[in-house]
Amino acid sequence: MSDAFLYLASQSPRRAQLLGQLGVRHELLLAAPDEDAEALEAVLPGESPTAYVQRVTALKLDAAVARHRRLGLPAAPILCADTTVALGRDILGKPADARDAERMLARLAGTTHRVLTAVAVQKGRGRHAALNVSRVRFAPMTRAQIARYVASGEPLGKAGAYGIQGAAAAFVEHIGGSYSGIMGLPMFETAALLRSVGLLKS
């Protein structure tokens, strides 16, 4: 473990876990109750999945930088990330409810989709960003399988209505790309960003 330190502006326990694997200490810099964090994730008309995930990550980082300034916290780099699932040009975000989760999973079953994770880190006035795009193929799924998975509660709060690190792994036939990127924080790209701001040695 190094003396490196940053703020992680994400409530995802998976991102915190992956960041810890890089040996970088972090503190959470989460949105206050009066901040409308969900509004940042609204999709613009005609927006591509790539443009969407990069724009949302930048907005989240803007909000985190403002939050850091408002709280008067000690100086340190701030890291943000956002993940979305795309089937063609359709963006599959977090399901609104169980029925929405079932609808998403029915669309993903038997197909290959993309998982896009954008990462951005700011140190002082400098900002660095990266994008990871991976592909996941789901096996065909019966309605009963989908219903059981949704009943577990795991799909709620997750882009595309599934978590690769959970029970949904049983439906994954093939992965092309970064497993950690599909989880929500691509290790290769994140390590490169942290080296660029001096938090990891080259």
Image (cartoon, rainbow, N blue to C red):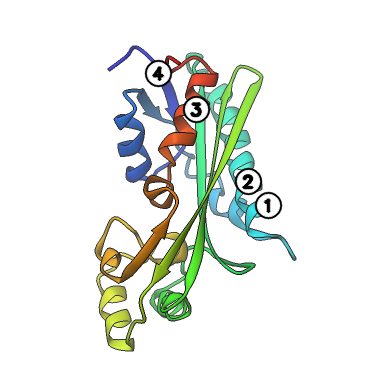
**Residue 70, position as x, y percentages in the image:** 57, 25
Residue 45 as seen in the image, left or right of residue 162: right
Eye-nearest disc, 4 or 3: 3
Who comes first in sequence, dot 4 or dot 2? 4
Left or right side of 24 for 70 = right
**65 left or right of 175 in image:** right
Viewport quadrant of the N terminus? top left
Q: Amino acid at mark 2?
A: Gln
The residue pinned by badge 1 equals 51
Say whether marks 4 and 3 touch (CB < 8 Å): no
Q: Contact (CB < 8 A) between labels 4 and 2?
A: no
Assess whether mark 1 and mark 4 are in contact (beta carbons under 8 angstroms). no
Q: Residue at x 45, y 37 (%)?
A: 30
Residue found 46% across the figure and 75% down from its top: 111
Q: Which mark is residue 122?
A: none
Instruction: Return the residue at label 2.
Output: 54
Residue 56: x percent and y percent? 61, 47
Of mark 3 and mark 1, the one earlier in the sequence is 1
Residue lying farthest to the right in this orientation: 46
Disc ID at residue 5: 4
Q: In the depicted view, which residue is nearer to us: 34 or 49?
A: 49
First along the sequence among labels 3 and 2: 2
- The residue at which mark 3 appears reads as 192
Q: Is residue 45 left or right of residue 107?
A: right
Q: Separation of disc 3 and disc 1 at Cα?
A: 21 Å
* Label 2 to label 1: alpha-carbon separation: 5 Å
At x 54%, y 20%, the residue is 196
What amino acid is labelled 1 in the image? Ala
- The amino acid at mark 3 is Ala
Give how far apart the Cα atoms at labels 4 and 2 are. 24 Å
Disc 2 to disc 1: CB gap under 8 Å: yes
Mark 4 is on which residue type? Phe
